Amino acid sequence: MVKDEIDELLDEMVQSKPLFKNREAVHSDYTPENILHRKNEKAAVIKSLSPLTKKSRPSNLLVYGKTGTGKTLIVKEMLKRITNHNELKSFPIKWIYSNAKEETTLYGLLVHFGKELGLKGKELPPTGLSISSVFNKIIQYIKDNKLKTIFVIDEIDSLVKPDSKKQEKDIFYMLTRANTRLDKDSFLTIIGISNDLTFKERLDPRVISSLSEEEIVFTNYTVEQINEILQERVKLALFPDIIEPAALNLCAAMSGQEHGDARRAIDLLRVAGEIAEREQATKIIEEHVRRAQQKMEEDKVTTALTSYPLHEKLLMIAVMRSNGSSTGEIYQTYKNLCKNIRQKEVTQRRATQILGDIDLSGMITGKIVHQGMHGRTKKYTLTIPPDTVKKAFKEDLALEDLL
Ligand SMILES: Nc1ncnc2c1ncn2[C@@H]1O[C@H](COP(=O)(O)OP(=O)(O)OP(=O)(O)O)[C@@H](O)[C@H]1O
Ligand SMILES: [Mg+2]
């Protein structure tokens, strides 16, 4: 058989030396055995849960801190540790973890919680019941079965939206006060986790006081701490001497630019390793890390762009076409685009608002320009390559003719 270029490429790939000995160890859901630099945070979580060791109910707890500071990891690990403690075997605690960003509605979250507790699916249909009757069923179930429960709501901020309905707000309040409806044989403690430091300002004062009976703030990692966390991961994930020390330092430095974000550091390491592997390099060097950073930036932008609603996309295209023009001119271009694809345009006022929002995301930038007696206007320019925009919108059939 004659080998073609694909066979040759495959042969090369099969023969090239692998860099990863355990790829799992650099995936985001991997639980490291060794949690470094979180001594105070671990102790604070354990102390907050310590009433369990006296067989009583811990207070509700709110855990705060920037993204990638180990909140999810530590809350879960500490719950495992305390509930697995030998002395507590005779005091079974049911703790249930949920992520509010994945469930998106309080109803969905409660149904998930109820099912995990042991309620049957037919008692908790995905729709059809009122949220308060789902809530009541859960409380009754906890009471009847004398359950000691802890409900962890990660990314709890996404439950509290400006447009939340009053009923939802009330249930949220009742959830944080659920314990008052239970007797001494059962309890329900809520642990909320959030990386949105302004989230509390959006809460009703009643909810604040009942949800944050206790509060723990996770500090940011320093670049040195991130460096050590990475070194631990490198030992698990890569064969020896695969990453150059300078490349590892760069991963740590790049993820510490805003604040020490361990997730970003580990992601950078993984992507840099994948890039190195793809070019059959035998070592991960700084250049791979730089390219990983660039790729992750691009992916982030692409994800944001593809999830934009239609008129956001159209305005983005309008900015791209009339780069550096005033809001008025961009609006004209946008109106023409709408006409081309037979869509009704939004008002200029709304378009101006949308442009402001896109500006906040950093993909375009606006500069106020004074135009003498005509007052002032904002001129917008694209801050990302036009090709990125085109690539991201390519899949959108409605825009096919415009790109
Ligand atoms: N001290 C640490 N030691 C080892 N790995 C860590 C440490 N802190 C965080 N990590 C790892 O970094 C990643 C992010 O941690 P985690 O998910 O706990 O962050 P978070 O604070 O919950 O962030 P977010 O607010 O974005 O959800 C995880 O993969 C976790 O395993
Ligand atoms: Mg988290």
Image: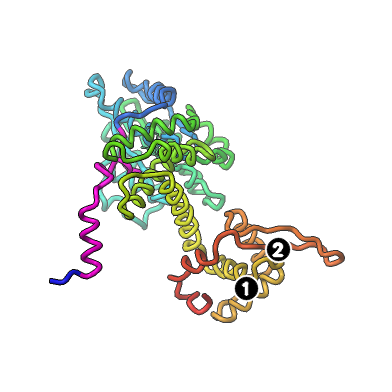
Amino acid type assigned to the residue bearing label 2 in the image:
Lys
Residue under the image location 41 percent in, 23 percent down: 39
x and y, in percent, of residue 398 in the image: 48, 75
Is the C-beta of the residue carrying label 1 under 8 Å from the nearest atom of ligand 1?
A: no
Furthest residue toward front: 2
User: For mark 1, what is the residue?
Assistant: 334
Q: Is residue 175 visible?
A: no
Residue 379: mark: 2
| x then y, percent, for residue 325 | 69, 68
Task: Give the SS element for disc 1.
Answer: helix
Assess whether residue 27 is covered by the magenta stretch: yes
Looking at the image, is mark 2 or mark 1 nearer the viewer? 2
Within the magenta stretch, is there residue 218?
Answer: no
Q: Which residues are magenta?
A: 4-32
Look at the image and tell me whether residue 55 can be seen.
yes
Which label number is shown at residue 113? none
Q: Earlier in the sequence, mark 2 or mark 1?
A: 1
Percent x, y of residue 232: 33, 32
Q: CA distance from mark 2 to mark 1?
A: 15 Å
Characterize the local packing of mark 1: few (<14), some (14-19) or many (20 or more) Cα atoms within 10 angstroms: many
Q: Quadrant of the N terminus?
A: bottom left
Tell me which colouring the rendered structure shows.
Answer: rainbow
Whether residue 46 is situated above or below residue 317 in the rendered picture: above
Q: Is residue 57 left or right of residue 394?
A: left
What's the amino acid at mark 1?
Answer: Tyr
User: Farthest residue in the right direction?
Assistant: 373
Residue at position x 61%, y 57% in the image: 357
Coordinates of residue 247 in the picture (x, y in percent):
41, 40
